[in-house]
Amino acid sequence: MTAEIAILNKTAIALAADSAVTISVGENQQKVYDSEDKLFELSRQDAIGIMINNNMHFMETPLPVLIKRYRAGCGRFDKVEDAALDFLKYLQSFGSSASQKLAERSLRAAIEPVLIVVRDRAQAKFVDRLSKDNPPGVGEDGLDWFRTLRARVLNEQILTMQRAIEGLPDTESIGDQAGNGLIDLVLNDLIAVHFPEFEDSHQAPMTQLTRLVLEKRVLWSAHTGIIVAGYGRNDIFPTLISFEIFGSVGGQLRFFQTNHVDIDREGTRAKVIPFAQKEMVDRFLYGLDDDIQRRISDFCKQSIPHIRELTIAQLDMPEDELSGIESDMKAAEEAFLDALREQTFDAIRQQSEEAIEDMVEFMPKSEMGKMAEALVNLTSIKRRVSRGVETVGGPIDVAVISQADGFVWVQRKHYFPQELNSRFFDRMREQISTAKES
């Protein structure tokens, strides 16, 4: 995981990212390194940067490698949106050229996590039913009963997962969809691994579930966060656009746009946006995060009915009148909880956010870089003193992008001593000079 920050006002954008990367081996083994690059210059000709998080590979290739290859050959862009779309098209082209083996692995990574959830829930429900029902004894009747129950439970979980995923937003795509043969091949392989007692009656709903997984924003699947920010050559004020990329699936790049911020004179004048692990930044910016909101809501949901029960118990009234009062109190409880979730929390967040962004609007570039670094460091410190793996940490890379100065590194790590590698920097200067001349 990671922590990343983007701060925008009319003058510039500050981007900051930590360096921790978590490598998982199997289900229980993890290793954390604190030397990963997540912040890059996307174009040598326009003031545009890019940050990445979560899955750091695309089609078995490190994304930093693809970003640097793209940067070496990309042209100029009128707007940041054009650069973001062009980079997505580059990834799609790279993904569509992969071998069938890699295409199968990409499909498997998208589909398998959801199938594992279905399998585990079906097994748990089957065991629960066994403890509650009275199965017949050992024999043919008993085996048929077990098979029927297992088939029914699996079908229920497939349909339940279908309904859950149908409510998720659709992803967008770039490229032509390949035929269904490869998808069916991968699905059948996964069924053989995870559902040894799979029956023909499950095939149609399982196929439908698979299609939904490939079309919807399913965050069980491995995905990559991409943030593109800066200035196109026609932009006066900065723009940020971010995506979640779900890989090259069946010949298409599947993605979902998560943010599109245009700074201007009349609309949004400043913005602070956290990415990936953002709960500490949310608390700083909004006074709340998702976990605190959930805990407050749960406390109210549990406490308020208890108050109603105590109140009703103290009233000496006819049963029909008590029933009417209790019904009115339940309606008031629901109205209170709805207002808490839909109005109060939003009002608290908005008030706190406006107070911060009113100051960010006029913040100098140097202070924007310091603030971005401090917000990432806030999450890093929280992870360091908390239980569990330290998934945010290491050196913090900071860049400030402005129309006047372009992409400027404020703080950047190197895995080698700079004083011993003068030829490296000479090569970089020569490449940048050549790119500008062309």
Image: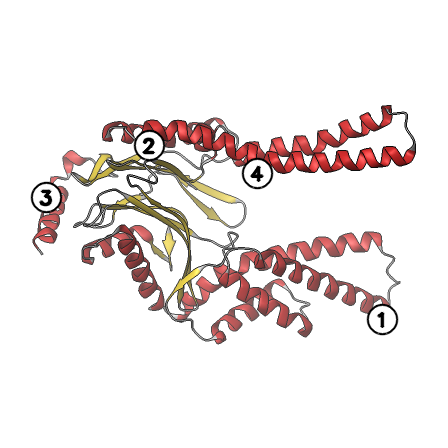
| CA separation in Å, label 3 and label 4 | 56 Å
Q: Secondary structure at mark 1?
A: helix
Residue at the far top: name it: 314
Which residue is at a point 66% across and 30% down the rendered structure image?
299
The residue beneath circle 4 is 342
- Viewer-nearest of discs 3 and 1: 3
The residue beneath circle 2 is 372
Task: Give the left or right position of residue 338, taking residue 29 as reference.
Answer: right
The answer to which of 229 and 149 lies nearer the viewer is 229
List x then y, in percent, for residue 47.
Answer: 21, 45
Q: Earlier in the sequence, mark 3 or mark 4?
A: 4
- Viewer-nearest of discs 4 and 2: 4
The answer to which of 75 and 101 lies nearer the viewer is 75
The residue beneath circle 1 is 140
- Viewer-nearest of discs 3 and 4: 4
Whether the residues at callouts 3 and 4 have beta carbons within 8 Å, the answer is: no
| CA separation in Å, label 4 and label 1 | 56 Å
- Quadrant containing the C terminus is bottom left
Q: Earlier in the sequence, mark 2 or mark 1?
A: 1
> Can I make out residue 430 in this image?
yes
Which residue is at a point 90% across and 28% down the rendered structure image?
317
Vertical relation: 313 (above or below) 28: above
The residue beneath circle 3 is 426
Task: Give the left or right position of residue 121, taking residue 318 as reference.
Answer: left
- Viewer-nearest of discs 2 and 3: 2
| CA separation in Å, label 3 and label 1 | 80 Å
Q: Earlier in the sequence, mark 4 or mark 1?
A: 1
